[in-house]
Image (spheres, grey):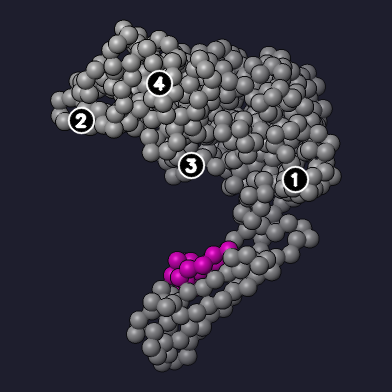
Amino acid sequence: DLEEGQTRMPDDCIKYQLIKDGKEVSLGLLSATGANPGRILDTGNVSAKKTYQYELRVWIDYDAGNEVMGTRFRGQLRIEAVQETPDRLYRKVASKAVLDNEASEFVSASTGINFGEAPSDTNGKGVYTLSSTKNDNYPVHYYRGEVNDNNIKFGGFCWKIVRTTNTGGVKLIYNGTPDASGACTNTTGEATQIGKSAFNSSYTSPADVGYMYGTRYEVQLKTLPTTGEQWIYGNDVEWDGSKYILKDTISSNTANWATDYKIVATKYHYSCFSTGNSCSEVGYIHYFSNSSPIYYLKLTGGKDIEDAKREMFTNTNDSRMKQTIDNWYASNMVEYTDKLEDTIWCNDRRIDRGPLKSKDEDSSIITGNNRTDYTFFNADGRNVRTYNPSIECTNKNDRFTVSDKIGNGKLTYPVALLTADELTLAGHGSNGYSNLSYLYTNQSSWIMSPRAFGSTSIYAFGIHPDGAIYDYLVSNPNAIRPAISLASTATVADGDGTAANPFTITTNS
């Protein structure tokens, strides 16, 4: 407290820097940390035998004015600690975890797990901490490889623990029903799923890859003109109120198309499919072949491809998959909703590469003499090309949640599917090795991540019966394994997590 007659310096004139173990945790004005005396500089969790070293610096902000003249700042640093129950499920998982970017008992490389290789006794088997989250209040821990201590009985069903969340919750995937003795012994086959369904009934529009979707722009086909006719192609379009005008154009004769198409495919995706550069409706070519036909999406009313993508990826209509999962949840799990957390389920529809990517970026990749320009979504880039999985979900539109506080608020119930990234963390891959993961069931099953859009069809990721992360036409009838997330209050009442003695859970609402 200040002495009588002294004036307190305003919080918005005081700047601070908090350093934890040599790294900056936060920097800013003291006014951003809360009101006196309840300012909070940092929160977190301290594991047993873990020590953190903090350094706090405080100074008058450079931009402070004359209002600081004659004022005083006096503060008191307080540390509050609460010991949590050791039976809390998040803590039980965390107690087994080791960092995934360094060597450990089942990881021989000094750089940690190689997600492009199979899980094994030298490349990950057990529980790991996602290194990018190690300094978070709730670091994310995940199971990898052939493990048998992540079994749970909850709501009358068996589940497998997949990972924890950044709010202290625990994500689970459906694994059938207990046997007569109460054990969770299902490992493969139809007993591990609630049934089969297409992801969506249709597969001829990019919209069809959505867990929910908007306007369907269907694939159109156009035959190349007769030899001698020069069609014009544009890198952009302008709408004058009644017609499209092609901008930054190039032309091609059918006789030269076998070589010209590779040039046109690099960026000239708009066309009126004529010798003119204006039309009342325009095509956006999303797939080129060295011969007929041309594959395109039809645009009208002044809309360009960016408008079309926004309309396609609007969350207006439930997918077949969402309908099926919601119906199952409504019949089996509603009474347990207050035991679950409203976490993010990611249907990442951002585009990694290909003709549907923004025209201002390198958008096209030639993939062979007879076809070009598959559009690939970001999950492909992370889990097939670079083996760099991520639990981030950048676009709020793709973050499926019940509430709109952290996501799009479009879910009816807190249930959905896992992502390709979560499968990669668990030990699955795109090259067929991953029957070594606890998620392997010898079934074709759906996950939530889009894969690619080709000439006439849209594909989403799933798990192949051999265990590989695989792409399926969204109309394919694959197995469904719903995923839920237990709230941070979930506590282990009994069991050790093995199939014979699975965890049983209690939660405090």
Question: Separation of disc 1 and disc 3 at Cα?
Answer: 26 Å
Q: Nearer the viewer, mark 2 or mark 3?
A: 2
Image quarter where the C terminus lies is top right
Which callout, 2 or 3, points at the residue further toward the start of the chain? Answer: 2
Which callout, 2 or 4, points at the residue further toward the start of the chain? Answer: 2
Tag 1–tag 2 contact (CB < 8 Å): no
Question: Separation of disc 2 and disc 4 at Cα?
Answer: 27 Å
Tag 1–tag 4 contact (CB < 8 Å): no
Would you name the residue on which mark 2 appears?
239
Crowd class of label 1 (few under 14; some 14 to 19; many from 20; radius 10 Å): some
Question: Separation of disc 3 and disc 4 at Cα?
Answer: 37 Å
Q: In this view of the protein, which residue sits in the foreground, 52 or 360?
A: 360
Give the secondary structure at mark 1.
loop
Which callout, 1 or 4, points at the residue further toward the start of the chain? Answer: 1
Q: In this view of the protein, which residue sits in the foreground, 121 or 32?
A: 121
Q: Residue at x 56, y 17 (%)?
A: 472
Would you name the residue on which mark 3 appears?
394
Percent coordinates x, y for residue 401 in the rendering: 48, 36
Would you name the residue on which mark 4 appears?
260
The amino acid pointed to by label 4 is Asp
Q: Is residue 413 left or right of residue 388?
A: left
Which label sits on residue 263?
A: none
Which callout, 1 or 3, points at the residue further toward the start of the chain? Answer: 1
Q: Residue at x 61, y 43 (%)?
A: 165
Q: Is residue 113 left or right of residue 291?
A: right
Would you name the residue on which mark 1 appears?
112
Question: Separation of disc 1 and disc 2 at Cα?
Answer: 53 Å
Where 173 falls versus 323 (above or below)?
Answer: below
Give the secondary structure at mark 3.
loop
Residue range corresponding to the magenta coloring: 25-42
Which callout, 1 or 2, points at the residue further toward the start of the chain? Answer: 1
